[in-house]
Structures are given as structure tokens and as C-alpha cells.
């Protein structure tokens, strides 16, 4: 047996092939995707480490016997964090390769289990403010530490500023306090307090910034943290030396202000993000942990991991099938929508295959576990984690600019100090010039430009019922070339409804069918029961493989397929049989209703389309390509091919192939994916921008960059509007910050500014950034 060229699933015998396309495929959907998109994988970054992305190196070779572990790592906030953690991990014996993603706080490690345990892997990554934990275990301690860091820093910062306002600032303007001698023991005590309080602010509250600067240097890629740290540390270092030399012009206040302002901006961004995330309700856990092992009528509850090929498991109605397998006893409708996106349950009889994660709806089944004892759902989870850990976090625009700006500022500061010394200036004067350049170049306006704009975007999105899970949304949206929509559950509600009633006695047939179906738990039954108003009661209910029957108003009524009615002795008129066949060709489900010797009507059930889907597609198609990606086939997808705003429809694509389809689309440009189901999760993670509906599964929302909690597809257009507005605001803030630097740095180089006025100018520029960020984005 060979694997599909596109999605690596086993192919049928013989496999699907085409003369015009190389490779073998598991289905027509994979073949059509390959024909339309070709092999674009060469244009898409493969699963390399972050160091390889930053330094142009190739990925490490991993032995076949290596095992994989996935960790969640708290504390990552930029691309240099990824490179730093990867380098730390691979320095440990037994670790072959490591790939981190700050966008998803996920890290994947390939390791030798004989040299290092999975628990030890977490310990090897933790440190320097990073905390590694199991991928599916939540940890909120980072939020608590951020609060305490800011509170303690704010308290000691106020103590520093109090001494400055009362004692030091007056002396800078020529007013010596008459009641204190700053050159004596009292002055030494005062300066000692200022030094101690400033040390707490810089070393404790500023630790994340200092760590980010260290990581930046270690990775060889300057970022905003390095720029902020340079100004804060240089101000602190100069002032510490000045105290030792008996000088009174100190700039601890500059160091404190820089650390507190930038930390406050970052905290505000994280706080708004956490508040938005809190709008999400807890979603149903889909993975099956336990199974009911069945042996000659006896059952035993065991962990799914204990199952082996050939075991029999009993699955009751409403439960999920624990692993892939084959039905050996029973007949039931099985809902596979979690995995396939198809809303219509499939009838499974003895000998039919079932997939792990699907739901048995109306009768118990005994399933024989497949040879490898794995679940399709579990494979999707593993694929999701693999994609997430390999997806690099987007480098913020400010950090991109910092790679050039930071070295330039440092060089200018050194040249200014050197020029001052070369022209006869004193060493203190040279240091002051260099310090002033570092201070004015910094930080606060640049440090606040991105987080405040992003916080405003998250806040407005939250008010519109959208949870932004990663700030990459605001960087990626303006560049999106293609928007991919899943069909079932996204363009449609994923629910069944009666879309047509054929037959002269349609109203009576609907009420009688609803009476019988109200006693069933099948999704088709729910759709029929919902359509009828005040149906009569039914008795003598009986469940059949392809329908139901009962007695209504004293009359035996049969509801189901035309074959079921004929097997019960009811004739089906040609007109109704023809309508049933047409419904099936159109991708709908026909349900015949009959009594008194013949079928009286055919109820046609189909998916409920979202009323807003066409307006959303029209709003996005003006400047982007629109693609529909679905596991469905036939007439159910033809309506989308006919829509003028949709450029391509890929039908019959299995879940494992959706992610590969998105990857190939990425070879042609930036891709946004909109979906709702677990089968969409790998594709959502693979896309540059993943958008999930709040009604979707936990896997889908975990994989997405943004979640529409109102379950309204119109939120996609709203998200694009807000994200584009936020991106523009970031550029405005950065533009102002660099304009300020373009004026302030030359003044500092010529000695026309001292550090005190540089700090005032820096504060003014920061206030302008804050004001600009507070304006409405739309």
C-alpha cells in the first residue's frame, strides 16, 4: 500500500492517478488540489529551526528512531526568543532538534528517550524567565508575576521620583535646598536610597526587558528590547559611577521612567489580550481518554492507550469512537462531522470502517480496534501541534526596524563621544553626549508604538465579538492575498433543515413525520421535528437501519429512505422517487413519508446556509482571491463555483490534505483560512492567518489567530477592517517616533541637549503616541 502524494494517507487499490499529474492520490479531491496548485512546497519555508530561519542554516538531521515531545513555553515574545530557546535545547545531550514558535507558545523537540526523559526536556528549556510545561496544561502564573512586577516597580519608582522632585530637580535649576547638604553624609544617604530603589526597578521590573536584550545579543539580531535596555542601563551605569565620583547630576530618573513606561505599555497590551480571551467559553473536549473494552458481553473501562489491535470496544449512543476500527456488531448512524465536516451522519453496519473521534448517534456499536490502534482525531491533534510548533512568530515591524536602528544609534553615540574627546572635551562631557544620544533615540515612543496600537486593536475587536489570540493578525491582514473558507459550519451553519417538501400531502406528511421523529435522537429527526408546528403524538415507535416508524392518529407511518418504505409494503410514486434521486444528486438528503399503502411526500433536507456568507465573500473578493475548501462533493458545492466572488473551489478534500492545500496556496502568497471544525485545525494553523468561528471545536479555536465568538461570519470582514486600521496606527506611531528621533538625535550629537531635556522630549513623544493610539480605529 502506498501513501497519497498530497496528504500521506493510504491510497486505495488501485490508487487515484491522472496522466497529467505525477504521483498517486487517495481521492479525487487530493488529485484536483495537486493539479491546480502544483508542488509549491519549495516556495514555503519548511520545518526548520528558528536559528535556521534567522541565520540561513539548514535543519538538523533527526534519526528515524527519535521521539517527539511538544511543550508550551511561557515567556516568549519575539523571534529572537525562538532562536535562543532552540539553541539552549539542542545544547543538551540527547536532543537532536528543536523548533519554537512564540506565536503559539509551542516548542517541538526531537530527542533520544534513552538519553533524556520528556520531563527533563522541560527543565532544559526553562530558565532566564522562560517556563516550559506540558502542552495541554494551562499556567496563569505569568499574569500574576506581571502584576507584582509592575506594582513593586511602580512603588520604588515613585520613591525615586519623590527624592528627585524634593531634592535633586531644584539643584539642577540652581536652587540648592537650604535645609540639606547634598555633599555630606545626608546626601550620601539620599543618593544611596535612590541607587537602591532604581536598582530594584531596573533589575526586577526591567528583568524581562534585560532578558530580551540578552537574547537579542545571543541571537545576533538587535530588537526593541536591546534599544530600551541600552538607554536604561547606560543611564543607570553613568549615574552609579557619578555617585562614586561625588557628582550630583544623576539620571536614575531616566532609567526608571524608561523601564516603567515600556513595561506598563506591554502589560496593558497583555491585559487587554487576556480580557478578550476570557470572553471565550470553555469548549467541549473532543479527544477520548477512556474506552469500554468488550469481551463476550463483559465490559471493562480502560485507558485508550491500553487498547491493542483486535480488541473490541463498546460505543454507546452519544459517545465518541475511541480509535479507528471496524464495526463487528450493531448498526447505527455515525456523525463524522468533527473530522470530515460533513453534516449528514453515515449509517454504519457490520464490516464498515469507523474513524476515531466520530460520534455514534442512535444505537450502540461494537467496534474492533484497527491494527495500529490509533485515532484519526489523535492524528489530527498531532498534526496540529506539529504545524503550530513549526510556525514562526511574525517579527514585529518595530523589531525589523531595530535591526538597523540599534547599531546605528550605538555607532553614533560612540562617534559623538570620540569627537568630543578629540576636540578637547572632558571624559565626563563625552560620556554625557553619548548618554544623551542613547536616551533621545530610545525607547519610550518606539517601545509604546506597537503595544498600544495592538492593545487598541484587541480592545475594538473584543467589543465587536472577536478574540485576537496573537498580534500576528495585525501584521498579516494587510498582506493577505487569498482567503480560504471551509464550507460546512463556516459558509453554512453545519445544521440540517428541511429545504423542500414534495407531494400533494406535504403538510400532513411533515406533521406525521415530526411526530415519529420526535422520539428519535438522529440529527435528521431533529431537523424534521424543528420544522413542524405542534405535531401530534406518536406511539409504537420502532427504529430501523434506514429510518423509523410509528403509529400516528391510529395510522402506521413509515419515515426513511424509499427502499425502507418499499420493504414495508408501501409503493413509491415515480414523481416522488425522481425527486428523491434529484435531491441526492444535489448533495441533499431525501426522507420519504408514507402510510396507508404508499409514499405521500418526500422531505428534502440540506445544510442551512449562513445568510451573510455572500456579502462577506463580496466584501473580501474585491482585492483578494477567495477559495472554498471542503470535504463535500457533488451539487452541494456547485453553488459556490457559480458565485462571481469565488475564484476556486476544492471539493472532496480529506482533513489531512487541508493543511497541505493551504501550504501550497502559501507558495503563491499570504493566506488566511476561515474554519470551525477539528478537521480544519491543521489548516488554520498552517495558514498565515487562521480565523475560527466560536461555535467551532476546541482544536479549531486553539489553532486560530482570531476567534469570532458571536458565531457571525460577518465578523471576518470586521476583523479585516480593524486589523488594517491597527496596522495603519502602528505605522503612524512608528513614523512619529522616528520623526522625533530624526530631530532629537542631531541635537544630542551637537551637544544642544542634555540628558534631562532629552528625557523630557522623550516623555512628550510618548504622550503623543499614547494619544494617537487612543483614537478609534474605524
Image: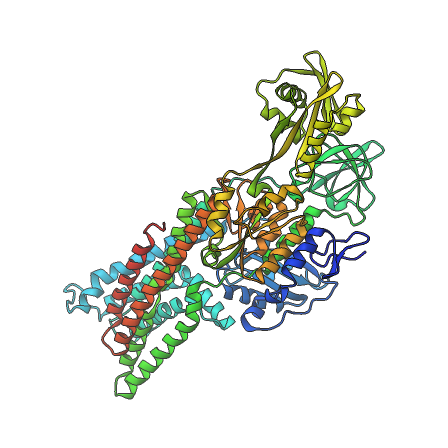
Of 485 and 623, the residue lying toward us: 623
- The residue sitting at the right extreme is 296
Residue 263 visible, this angle: no
Residue 48 position within the rendered picture, expressed as x and y whole percent measured from the top left: 61, 66
Residue 46 position within the rendered picture, expressed as x and y whole percent measured from the top left: 62, 65
Q: Is residue 639 above or below residue 729?
A: above
* Label total for image: 0
Of 378 and 495, the residue lying toward us: 495
Is residue 175 left or right of 235 when viewed as pictured? Answer: left
Is residue 453 left or right of 634 when viewed as pictured? Answer: left
Residue 312 position within the rendered picture, expressed as x and y whole percent measured from the top left: 81, 39
Quadrant housing the N terminus: bottom right
Q: How is the image coloured?
A: rainbow
Of 456 and 23, the residue lying toward us: 23
Is residue 758 left or right of 174 when viewed as pictured? Answer: right
Is residue 368 left or right of 490 when viewed as pictured? Answer: right
Residue 3 visible, this angle: yes
Question: Residue drawn 56% across and 43% down?
Answer: 490
Q: Is residue 504 above or below residue 373?
A: above
- The residue sitting at the top extreme is 554
Question: Residue drawn 36% across and 60% down?
Answer: 449
Question: Residue drawn 67% across and 29% down?
Answer: 522
- The residue sitting at the front extreme is 575
**Quarter residue 350 falls in:** top right
Residue 165 position within the rendered picture, expressed as x and y whole percent measured from the top left: 22, 60
Of 621 and 688, the residue lying toward us: 621
Amino acid at each position: 500500500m502506498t501513501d497519497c502524494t498530497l496528504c500521506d494517507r493510504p491510497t486505495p487499490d488501485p490508487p487515484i492517478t491522472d496522466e497529467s499529474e505525477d504521483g498517486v492520490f487517495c481521492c479525487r479531491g487530493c488529485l484536483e488540489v495537486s493539479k491546480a496548485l502544483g508542488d509549491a512546497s519549495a516556495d514555503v519555508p519548511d520545518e526548520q529551526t528558528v536559528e535556521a530561519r534567522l541565520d540561513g542554516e539548514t535543519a538538523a538531521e533527526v534519526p528515524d528512531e527519535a521521539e517527539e515531545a511538544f511543550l508550551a513555553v511561557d515567556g516568549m515574545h519575539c523571534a529572537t526568543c525562538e532562536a535562543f530557546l532552540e539553541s539552549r535545547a539542542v545544547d543538551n545531550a540527547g536532543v537532536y532538534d528543536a523548533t519554537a514558535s512564540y506565536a503559539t507558545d509551542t516548542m517541538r523537540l526531537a530527542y533520544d528517550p534513552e538519553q533524556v526523559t520528556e520531563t527533563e526536556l522541560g527543565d532544559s528549556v526553562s530558565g532566564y524567565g522562560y517556563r516550559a510545561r506540558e502542552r495541554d496544561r494551562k499556567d496563569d502564573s505569568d499574569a500574576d508575576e506581571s502584576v507584582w512586577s509592575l506594582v513593586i516597580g511602580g512603588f520604588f519608582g515613585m520613591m525615586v521620583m519623590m527624592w528627585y522632585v524634593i531634592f535633586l530637580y531644584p539643584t539642577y535649576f540652581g536652587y540648592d535646598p537650604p535645609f540639606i547638604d547634598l555633599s555630606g553624609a545626608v546626601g550620601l544617604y539620599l543618593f544611596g536610597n535612590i541607587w537602591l530603589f532604581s536598582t530594584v526597578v531596573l533589575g526586577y521590573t526591567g528583568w524581562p526587558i534585560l532578558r530580551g536584550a540578552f537574547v537579542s545579543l545571543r541571537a545576533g539580531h538587535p530588537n526593541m528590547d536591546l534599544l530600551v535596555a541600552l538607554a536604561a542601563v547606560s543611564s543607570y551605569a553613568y549615574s552609579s559611577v557619578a555617585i562614586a565620583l561625588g557628582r550630583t547630576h544623576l539620571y536614575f530618573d531616566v532609567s526608571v521612567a524608561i523601564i516603567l513606561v515600556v513595561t506598563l505599555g506591554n502589560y496593558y497590551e497583555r491585559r487587554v489580550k487576556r480580557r478578550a480571551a476570557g470572553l471565550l467559553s470553555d469548549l467541549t473536549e473532543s479527544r477520548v481518554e477512556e474506552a469500554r473494552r468488550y469481551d463476550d458481553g463483559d465490559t471493562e473501562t480502560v485507558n485508550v492507550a491500553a487498547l491493542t489491535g483486535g480488541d473490541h470496544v463498546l460505543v454507546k449512543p452519544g459517545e465518541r469512537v475511541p480509535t479507528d476500527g471496524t464495526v463487528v456488531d450493531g448498526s447505527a448512524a455515525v456523525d463524522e462531522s468533527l473530522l470530515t465536516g460533513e453534516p449528514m451522519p453515515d449509517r454504519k453496519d457490520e464490516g464498515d470502517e469507523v474513524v476515531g473521534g466520530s460520534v455514534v448517534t442512535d444505537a450502540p456499536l461494537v467496534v474492533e480496534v484497527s491494527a495500529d490502534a490509533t485515532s484519526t482525531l489523535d492524528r489530527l491533534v498531532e498534526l496540529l501541534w506539529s504545524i503550530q510548533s513549526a510556525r514562526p512568530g511574525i517579527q514585529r515591524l518595530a523589531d525589523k526596524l531595530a535591526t538597523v536602528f540599534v547599531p546605528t544609534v550605538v555607532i553614533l553615540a560612540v562617534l559623538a563621544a570620540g569627537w568630543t574627546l578629540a576636540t578637547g572635551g572632558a571624559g565626563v562631557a563625552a560620556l554625557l553626549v553619548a548618554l544623551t544620544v542613547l536616551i533621545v533615540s530610545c525607547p519610550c515612543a518606539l517601545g509604546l508604538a506597537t503595544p498600544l496600537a495592538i492593545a487598541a486593536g484587541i480592545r475594538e475587536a473584543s467589543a465587536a465579538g472577536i478574540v485576537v489570540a496573537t498580534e500576528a493578525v495585525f501584521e498579516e491582514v494587510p498582506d493577505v492575498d487569498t482567503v480560504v473558507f471551509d464550507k460546512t459550519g463556516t459558509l453554512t451553519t453545519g445544521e440540517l433543515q428541511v429545504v423542500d417538501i414534495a407531494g400533494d400531502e406535504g403538510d400532513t406528511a411533515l406533521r406525521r413525520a415530526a411526530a415519529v421523529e420526535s422520539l428519535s435522537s438522529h440529527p435528521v429527526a431533529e431537523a424534521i421535528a424543528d420544522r413542524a408546528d405542534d405535531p401530534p403524538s406518536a406511539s409504537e415507535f420502532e427504529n430501523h437501519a434506514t429510518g423509523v416508524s410509528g403509529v400516528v392518529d391510529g395510522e402506521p407511518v413509515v419515515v426513511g429512505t424509499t427502499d425502507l418504505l418499499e420493504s414495508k409494503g408501501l409503493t413509491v410514486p415515480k414523481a416522488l422517487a425522481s425527486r428523491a434521486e434529484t435531491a441526492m444528486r444535489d448533495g441533499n438528503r431525501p426522507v420519504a413519508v408514507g402510510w396507508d399503502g404508499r409514499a405521500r411526500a418526500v422531505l428534502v433536507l440540506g445544510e442551512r446556509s449562513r445568510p451573510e456568507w455572500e456579502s462577506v465573500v463580496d466584501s473580501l473578493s474585491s482585492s483578494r482571491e477567495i477559495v472554498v475548501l471542503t470535504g463535500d462533493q457533488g451539487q452541494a458545492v456547485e453553488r459556490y463555483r457559480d458565485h462571481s466572488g469565488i475564484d476556486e473551489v476544492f471539493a472532496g478534500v480529506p482533513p489531512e490534505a487541508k493543511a497541505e492545500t493551504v501550504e501550497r496556496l502559501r507558495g503563491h502568497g499570504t493566506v488566511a483560512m476561515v474554519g470551525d471544525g477539528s478537521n480544519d485545525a491543521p489548516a488554520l494553523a498552517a495558514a498565515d492567518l487562521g480565523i475560527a468561528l466560536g461555535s467551532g471545536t476546541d482544536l479549531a479555536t486553539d489553532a486560530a489567530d482570531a476567534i469570532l465568538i458571536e458565531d457571525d461570519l460577518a465578523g471576518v470582514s470586521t476583523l479585516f477592517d480593524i486589523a488594517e486600521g491597527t496596522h495603519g496606527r502602528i505605522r503612524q506611531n512608528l513614523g512619529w517616533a522616528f520623526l522625533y528621533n530624526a530631530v532629537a538625535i542631531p541635537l544630542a550629537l551637537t551637544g544642544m541637549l542634555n540628558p534631562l531635556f532629552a528625557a523630557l522630549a522623550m516623555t512628550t513623544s510618548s504622550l503623543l503616541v499614547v494619544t494617537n493610539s487612543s483614537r478609534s480605529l474605524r
